[in-house]
Amino acid sequence: MAKLILSMDGLTLNEIPLSKERTIIGRKPHNDIQIDNLAISGEHAVVVKVLNDCFLEDLNSTNGTFVNGQSVKKHLLQNNDVIELGKYRLKYVAEVAQAPTAAADFEKTMVLRPDVMRKTAEQMASKGFGDTQTGIKAAPAPQQQQPNPPPAQPAAAPAAPAPKPLTLLGAIQILTGANSGREMELTKTLTTLGKPGVQVAVIARRPHGYFITHVEGTQFPVVNGNTLSTQAHPLADHDIIELAGVKMEFFLKG
């Protein structure tokens, strides 16, 4: 899980895991990260978590928000970025991808050639074992009669199929407003839409599809007439999105 490391003058004060979708930083006690210093505004900045990415957004603070020495209004945080708020520092530490497990490595390398399988079966047969489709079994033991055999167990339900990887490029077409008819391809990993200070959402391009997530504003985006929650929402071909008073259509290009 990504986290922020709060420090001052090189001294670490706290480590805060970014487990919430919105982590607000400010001077007032109700903030998720409270920094009691007059250089910090009451609600100074917010970190918005969108799937595996985190955005830093300045909340119109008096003294501004800086990342790596640069003033920012909105910034996609990268591993080891340093957020500067007055004399305080918040170092962003991104999630570390897990290394493949031993079981996964074993599964990838377990390859049997037909000639090896045939020789193995012949060797087992010469030693008094028989082969089946599901594995190798010993010669059957004498059967014992059972007056009341147990009822047959129902077959297990088949496993759900794995999601198909995304192969088509997504795009949006503006349906209303001054830019009606304009088309934009969603080639970036993250595409921000809306009006800052009014309503902002982000569309994330992931290996298995496109997802839209609310970022800023009291009103949440609407998809096909349904208002979204704070959770990321998967987009389907020809979904109609309403955002900041503009209607647009999401579609997949062949």
Image (cartoon, rainbow, N blue to C red):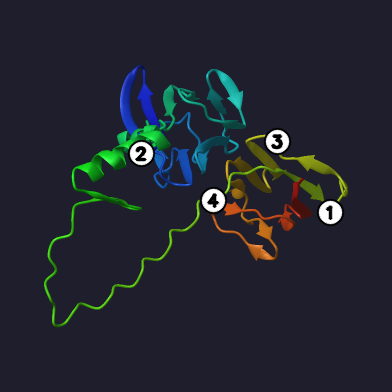
**CA–CA distance in space, label 4 to label 2:** 32 Å
Name the front one of labels 1 and 3: 3
Residue wearing tag 4: 163
> Disc 2 on helix, strand or loop?
helix
**Mark 2 vs mark 1: in front:** 2
Viewer-closest of 250 and 120: 120
Tell me the kind of residue under disc 2: Met
Residue 175, which numbered label? 1
**Nearer the observer, disc 3 or disc 4?**
4
Q: Which of marks 1 and 4 is nearer the N terminus?
A: 4
Q: Up-down: is 230 above or below 89?
A: below
Q: Which amino acid does label 1 sit on?
A: Leu
Residue 180 seen in the current view: yes
What is the C-alpha distance between the residues marked 3 and 4? 21 Å
Q: Name the residue type under label 4.
A: Pro
First in sequence, mark 2 or 3: give its number.
2
Q: Quadrant of residue 145?
A: bottom left
- Bin the neighbour count of mark 2 within 10 Å (Cα to Cα): few under 14, some 14-19, many 20 and up: few
Q: Is residue 201 above or below residue 240?
A: above
For disc 3, the marked residue is 187
Q: Residue 253, how many percent across, how many down?
A: 77, 45
Extreme residue toward the bottom, this view: 147
